Amino acid sequence: MPDLFPLQVTINGQTRRCSVEPRTHLVDFLREDIGLKGSHLGCEHGVCGACTVELNGQIVRGCLTLAVQADGGTVQTIEGLSQSGTVRDLQQAFIARNALQCGFCTSGMLMAAKELIETRPEATRTEVRDWISGNYCRCTGYHAIVDAICDVLRQRKES
């Protein structure tokens, strides 16, 4: 039996104490140990963005981040952001613009879009495209996704 590392992490506002193998990736920990299946495993090389979660206020690739790196930290997943209503306008815009089909990339896209909107509320369409370029979508193409994010940028600016 491998050595286990004691881990304390706040996930979506709830503090968890558990033990993990030091080599366990954050996305595997979230999906298998915690039961949060919203972040997906795609390429497992940090390229596709399907595993994107927020660690200590910044998005990270869950397949490249070890669970032990989150020790003492705070993790937000798409489940937590959805329950809190933080990304409700983004979710509604994705639906309205048909910016999702199979949904595999959607949680990572929403995590990236949330960070963009919070850090660059004046982002242009080109900047939106650049920002999400690290998140792959094989179904919809990117026009509808960029449209949805731009809609939310515009709505938040007007309110």
Image (cartoon, rainbow, N blue to C red):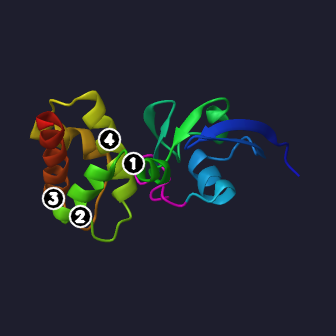
Instruction: Find out whether residue 130 is within the magenta segment.
Output: no
Q: CA distance from mark 2 to mark 1?
A: 25 Å
Q: Foreground mark, 4 or 1?
A: 4
The magenta segment:
37-50
Look at label 3 and name its amino acid. Answer: Ala
Do callouts 4 and 3 mark residues in contact (Cβ within 8 Å)? no
Look at label 1 and name its amino acid. Answer: Val
Do callouts 1 and 3 mark residues in contact (Cβ within 8 Å)? no
Give the camera-side residue of 76 and 32.
76
- Residue 95 tag number: 2
Report whether 88 appears left or right of 19: left
Q: Closer to the N terminus: mark 2 or mark 1?
A: 1
Look at label 4 and name its amino acid. Answer: Lys
Report the residue marked by disc 3. 144
Is 11 rendered above or below residue 78?
above
Q: Residue at x 25, y 39 (%)?
A: 131
Q: Residue at x 38, y 64 (%)?
A: 104
Look at label 2 and name its amino acid. Answer: Ile
- SS at circle 2: helix
Report whether 67 appears left or right of 119: right
Q: CA distance from mark 3 to mark 2?
A: 10 Å
Q: CA distance from mark 4 to mark 3?
A: 16 Å
Q: CA distance from mark 1 to mark 3?
A: 21 Å
